[in-house]
Image (cartoon, helix red, strand yellow):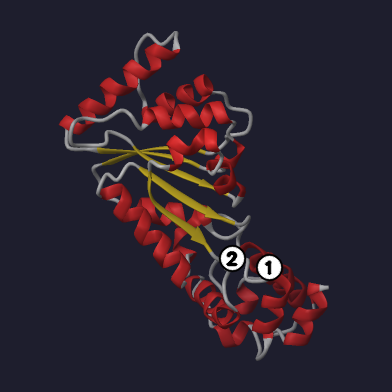
Amino acid sequence: MYESFFGLHEPAFSLTPDPRFLWPSDTHEEGLGALCYGIESRRGFLLLTGEVGAGKTTLLRAALERLPDETDTALILNTAGLGPVDLLKLIVRELGVEGPLATKADYVIALNGFLLQRLADGRNVVLIIDEAQNLDRAALEEVRLLSNLETDTQKLLQIVLTGQPELRATLAEPALRPLRQRIALEHHVESLLPEEIRSYLKHRIHVARGRYERVFGPGVEKVFFEFSRGCPRLINLLADRVLLAAYGKDLRPVSAEFVEQKAR
């Protein structure tokens, strides 16, 4: 609605996890490197955590874009209330595994056969479970058992668990220690620092083919940080709100004072 007024060719602050808009902060670059290395080198279990709105899903999608073509992916997004068998059903459906599947053993046998064939075909299979903090202990134990699908030299299934910080606390429980000990690589996505806000805003505007100086005036970065505490999703929410209001008032570039008004 306001894009053309600010010289943008598309929304710069959408909440969708578009990997084009991933700004390579130190924490996101480190996370991206860990994901790509862990998956491509078949390290088995990977853990990615971060606060709500930290950019975990965008980071995941960026990692998937960088993986070799010989990679099959199962992405599980809706984890609330899933039991062990429910989780297995979603995994085999995502991977396109077929066969007579009636019992839990049927699912595991079919999945193991599928993974062995993929390995023989030179392909790597990745299971990504988003919002894994919603899984109960039984489902998490089932995930651990899936990591037993391996040959003498290769992990058949690379498993990426992503979630909020409470996932780390859950995995630290004594009952889940066997799963915790299998995690080969982990990364916690930190919030952006005050000095990174300008680069973050500028990057998103640049991807939308706009000019930063046409959109925001001096000093807005401090207001964005104070409002968001470095959370990318909150930065995007405020930026979208501010630009819509500024468009209605024919105001450009947007001043720090105007951003502060809308941040209240």
Find the residue positioned furthest to the bottom: 218
Determine crowd level at label 2: few under 14, some 14-19, many 20+ residues with C-alpha closer than 10 A: some
Image coords of residue 143 (percent x, y): 45, 31
Quarter-wise, where is residue 125 in the image?
top left
Quarter-wise, where is residue 173 in the image?
top right
Relative to 233, is 85 on the left or the right?
left
Query: Which one is earlier in the sequence, the residue at label 2 or at label 1?
Result: 2
Relative to 241, is 120 on the left or the right?
left
Asked which secondary structure carries label 1, the reply is helix
- Give the alpha-carbon distance from disc 2 to disc 1, as whole Å: 9 Å
Name the one closer to the observer, 165 or 58. Answer: 165
Q: Residue at x 57, y 43 (%)?
A: 131
Relative to 32, is 132 on the left or the right?
right
Asked which secondary structure carries label 2, the reply is loop
Q: Is residue 249 above or below residue 65?
A: below
For the C terminus, the quadrant is: bottom right
Give amino acid for label 2: Pro
Give the label on residue 240, or none: 1
User: What residue did someone put label 2 on?
Assistant: 11
Image coords of residue 95 (percent x, y): 37, 29
Name the one closer to the observer, 254 or 138. Answer: 138
Q: Residue at x 65, y 91 (%)?
A: 218
State yes or no: discs 2 and 1 in contact (Cβ < 8 Å): yes
Image coords of residue 187 (percent x, y): 45, 57
For the N terminus, the quadrant is: bottom right
Image coords of residue 225 (percent x, y): 67, 76
Find the residue positioned furthest to the front: 174
Q: Is residue 35 visible?
A: yes
Give amino acid for label 1: Asp
Relative to 245, is 99 on the left or the right?
left
Name the one closer to the observer, 107 or 224. Answer: 107
Q: Is residue 1 visible?
A: no
